Image (cartoon, grey):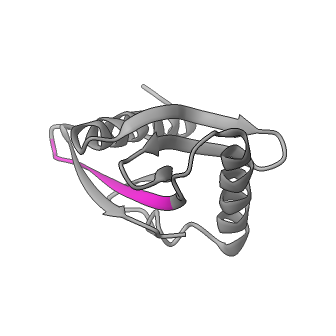
């Protein structure tokens, strides 16, 4: 049996994996996963579409969470994410403009413990 913290980490990793797969199916190229900078923190997924370099904040919650994934992004987190995206863009040789999206995942468990996932993908959310 996993502790609450271990279960949250497992769900978070699985959520990021599912969002990366979703993006690949939509034609995005995954450039980085879990990119980290000591000043700005982590960006879950960095991808390239035909039009943008896309920075994705993945928020995974259980169905009984008090606050949704989108609601959990406060002004400080949004600013850190924008700063990290700007820093990453300075190192990338591209003419594509950046965009910051949020992938809000909800995992629902039935009475037998089987998980189903619901994705709300919001472009240009931050």
Determine whether, in the image, residue 92 is placed left or right of residue 32: right
Using the image as rendered, state which of residue 27 and residue 21 is in the foreground: 27
Q: Is residue 7 above or below residue 63?
A: above
Which residues are the magenta region?
100-111
User: In which quarter of the view is residue 122 placed?
Assistant: bottom left
Confirm whether residue 60 shows in the render.
Answer: yes
Residue at (55, 69) in percent of width and height: 126
Residue at (34, 41) in percent of width and height: 28
Residue at (52, 42) in percent of width and height: 46
Using the image as rendered, state which of residue 27 and residue 60 is in the foreground: 27
Using the image as rendered, state which of residue 24 and residue 71 is in the foreground: 24
Q: Main secondary structure of the magenta part?
A: strand
Question: Which residue is farthest right?
Answer: 39
Rendering coords of residue 40 (x, y %): 77, 50
Q: Based on the picture, tell me whether residue 56 belongs to the magenta stretch.
A: no
Confirm whether residue 10 shows in the render.
Answer: no
Using the image as rendered, state which of residue 119 and residue 110 is in the foreground: 119
Residue at (24, 45) in percent of width and height: 26
Q: Based on the picture, tell me whether residue 103 belongs to the magenta stretch.
A: yes
User: In which quarter of the view is residue 52 placed?
Assistant: bottom left
Q: Is residue 4 above or below residue 6?
A: below
């Amino acid at each position: 049996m996993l502790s609450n913290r271990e279960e949250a980490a497992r769900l978070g990793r699985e959520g990021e994996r599912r969002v990366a797969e979703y993006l690949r199916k939509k034609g995005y190229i995954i450039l980085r996963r879990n990119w980290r900078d000591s000043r700005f923190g982590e960006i879950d997924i960095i991808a390239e579409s035909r039009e943008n370099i896309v920075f994705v904040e993945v928020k995974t919650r259980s169905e009984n969470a008090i606050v949704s994934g989108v609601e959990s992004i406060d002004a400080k987190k949004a600013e850190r994410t924008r700063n990290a995206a700007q820093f990453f863009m300075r190192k990338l040789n591209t003419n594509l403009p950046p965009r910051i999206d949020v992938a809000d995942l909800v995992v629902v468990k039935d009475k037998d413990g089987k998980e189903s996932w619901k994705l709300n993908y919001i472009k240009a959310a931050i």
